[in-house]
Image (cartoon, rainbow, N blue to C red):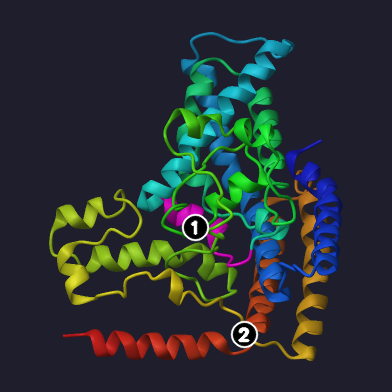
Amino acid sequence: MTPSQIIVLATPVFLGAITLELVVGIARGRNTYRLHDALASIGLGMMSQLVGLFTKLLAIGLYVAAYEHVALWRLPSDSLAVWLGALLLYDLCYYWLHRAGHRIGIFWAAHVVHHQSEDYNLSTALRQTSSGALLGWLFYLPMAVLGVPPLVFGTVALIDLLYQFWVHTQQVGKLGWFDRWFCSPSNHRVHHAVNDRYLDRNYGGILIVWDRLFGSFEEERDDEPCVYGTRAPLRSFDPLWANLEVYAALARDAWHACSWWDKLRIWFMPPGWRPADVAQRFPKPAFRIEAVQRFDPLMSRGAKVAAFGLFVVLLIGACVLLWFAHQWSPPTLLIGAVLIVVGLWVVGRLGEGGARSRSFAAATADRTSAAP
């Protein structure tokens, strides 16, 4: 069974858990879902899986090549100790990849997709990048060098990914001793928050111990509720722009920078860093948490029905494509993936209800007034 087929089989479980969380939230009077945002998040997860049919071949190929040619030894794949050690080592490598995703611009450009939602619920867990495989493989090469077999590596990677689904919820409170050792809903809520206290904290995938060891842990406080999203809000439900916005911003600032050194290092500096000359000519307002307003455009009843209906069709199509991906030719997969992504773009436009055109006009006016 392929990893894509495992994701397809897990999809009903994901959707069932999302439905349960929605029902529980409504019953408690603490509903955390909005239709357009949830469809955007799940749609980005679908897009990530479809793009992964092509990009993951690169990452897997590089891992296998490193394993075949530079592994110090070949660990046995029938040893329980190897499997447990591989899971532990993968989680450590993931911690550093995740930390780089918040501290290095080009890695943030990929990872930002997961943080763009201003809601926090199980649909947010499915909101994944489509470009992460391009550089993320670098952090897992130590496992290949140490001789972790590709089959073991792929399996523990899937386990680590699936574990993180359930921690994206506001319906589960603190869990006592569990919070001290593992990534939990409380710990991960902190990670998704933009509050000063919480920013860039709690990177652990399965274990939160890594954060305690490397000084990046912060506990959720009852007196400071988490505010979700990013400090440079996306304000769109377009899946293509969601994946490209930070790359575009980095490229734009690199283009405007006068110094060649600044043009290069902007890609490797922390998110938000800008060359002094660029920041002076093209200023951006400082982030103020009290000024945060969720992107929540109104949707007519007809737009909701159309968006939801189209989304269901696209979800079924994506599941079919992922299930039979190993049997179909690359051109067939590419055509199918493009059609589904176009459909997701339409769903996003329906969710925006014309809000993006108004936001674009306002942003254009701001840039014009800020120009020298």
Callout 1 environment at 10 Å: few (<14), some (14 to 19), or many (20+)?
Answer: many
Residue 254, how many percent across, how many down?
A: 25, 62
Q: Amino acid at mark 1?
A: Val
Callout 2 environment at 10 Å: few (<14), some (14 to 19), or many (20+)?
Answer: some
Q: As rendered, which of 49 and 262 lies closer to the eye?
A: 262
- Who comes first in sequence, dot 1 or dot 2? 1
Residue 226 appearing in the image: yes
* Numbered badge on residue 112: 1
* Residue 115 lies within the magenta run: yes
Q: Amino acid at mark 2?
A: Pro
Q: Secondary structure at mark 1?
A: helix
* Numbered badge on residue 328: none
Q: CA distance from mark 1 to mark 2?
A: 21 Å
Residue drawn at x 69%, y 59% is: 121
Image quarter (top left, top right, bottom left or bottom right) of the N terminus: top right
* Residue 208 lies within the magenta run: no
Identify the residue position indicated by label 2 in the image: 297
Disc 1 + disc 2, Cβ < 8 Å: no
Residue 60, how many percent across, how many down?
A: 58, 34
Residue drawn at x 73%, y 74% is: 35
Residue drawn at x 59%, y 10% is: 74
Image quarter (top left, top right, bottom left or bottom right) of the C terminus: bottom left
Residues drawn in magenta: 107-119
Query: Taking 145 as reference, is 207 above or below it?
Result: below
Residue extending furthest front?
223
